[in-house]
Image (spheres, helix red, strand yellow):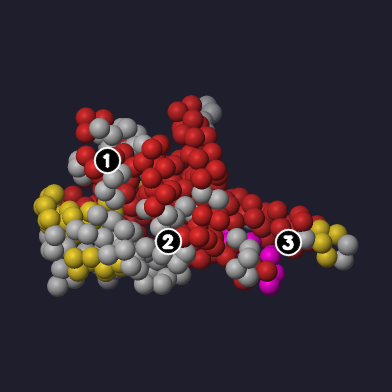
Amino acid sequence: MSVDLGLSADQEAIADLFGGFFANESPTTVARAAEPFGFDADLWAKLIELGAPGMGSAVEHGGGGASLSDLVVVAEAFGRAIAPVPLLEHLAAALVLTDADVISGDAIATVAVRPADAAGVWHLVPAGAVAHVVVGLDGDELVAVRSTPPMVSPRNHASAPLADRSAREGERVVLGTAAAFAPVLDRWKVLTAAALVGVADAAMALGVQYVMDRQQFGVPVGSFQAVQHGLADLPVMIDGGRLLTHKAAWAIDSGDAGINDWRLNDITDGSTLASMAFVFTTDGAALATDRSLHYHGGYGFSEEYDIQLYYRRARGWSLVLDDPSIECLNLADRLFGPRGA
């Protein structure tokens, strides 16, 4: 029996649409121009025209009804372009929001990936500098807080519009208990994982092109076996991350109660797979950008070359949640039992 791991016809169409969109509307010059703040309002307006902000919202609320598996395809194209817009955060937050202006994209929504502190502050919220609505945990409540975005951000490695936001000041709506936040965070992890696959894939392409073009000793650098070996390792990690991310999206879309049987290598729990995809793709993106930058030689550290843009985002996007090693420990607790038990 054969297993078809390819995209569906609809997903192929989505890949073509958004691949073409980001290639035309968000070349790396757009990401460069948006630094250091990391937000291009014109690009966001074009995504609104495309209907992207509401793709994953329910049809009955005016959205496109796209599955998470469909959104993963969009997120990979987004990551490949390192587009300076908060599309992933918005798509994750929109899972629990039905506001018409959020679904249309006129109001930007985001997810506070860590709970508010005792003073009711969410720290370094992804897209917090530009979002009108923030969804996150405040104590044992899942809340959505609408307030004016600060439009200022501390300088950071990935040139992302991070900002602290209040969980208690503004128009505050309680959406549910803390348990209701897990699907939102899982969605964010899966979409971020897909974007990191795109980052890794683009970095590999940059590295391959450079070593084909760069001449040394009268031959392309890519003709040296050590360079070939370094780049030949990357497709396994990239394709593995892509497969794992799609499996996580499939498991979440199914809505079934999955299982975590590591002894039989049978993991079908969506939340577990979301964490696995996130930590695997953070490693893959870090490795791909590191190898590509290394083979660029000194030029890799130069601002004139695009690889440094991907190198910084591979690390900055991975650290938004926390040190990835913390997620690895949490994942190990889930699979093997709590530490110290």
Q: Is residue 192 above or below residue 330?
A: above
Q: Nearer the viewer, residue 180 or 11?
A: 11
Q: Residues within 10 Å of mark 1 (few under 14, many from 20)?
A: many
Q: Percent position (x, y) of residue 87?
A: 37, 49
Q: Quadrant of the C terminus?
A: bottom left
Residue 26 appears in view: yes
Which of pointers 2 and 3 lies earlier in the amino acid sequence? 2
Q: Amino acid at mark 3?
A: Val
Residue 191 appears in view: no
Q: Which residue is mark 3?
A: 227
Majority secondary structure in the magenta region: helix
Q: Percent position (x, y) of residue 237?
A: 55, 53
Rendered image quadrant of residue 203: bottom right
Q: Which residue is mark 2?
A: 38
* Numbered disc 2: secondary structure: loop
Q: Percent position (x, y) of residue 278?
A: 41, 55
Q: Judge from the rendering whether residue 75 lies leftward or rightward of residue 254; answer left or right.
A: right
Q: Judge from the rendering whether residue 298 lies leftward or rightward of residue 56; answer left or right.
A: right
Q: Is residue 289 magenta?
A: yes
Q: Amino acid at mark 1?
A: Ile
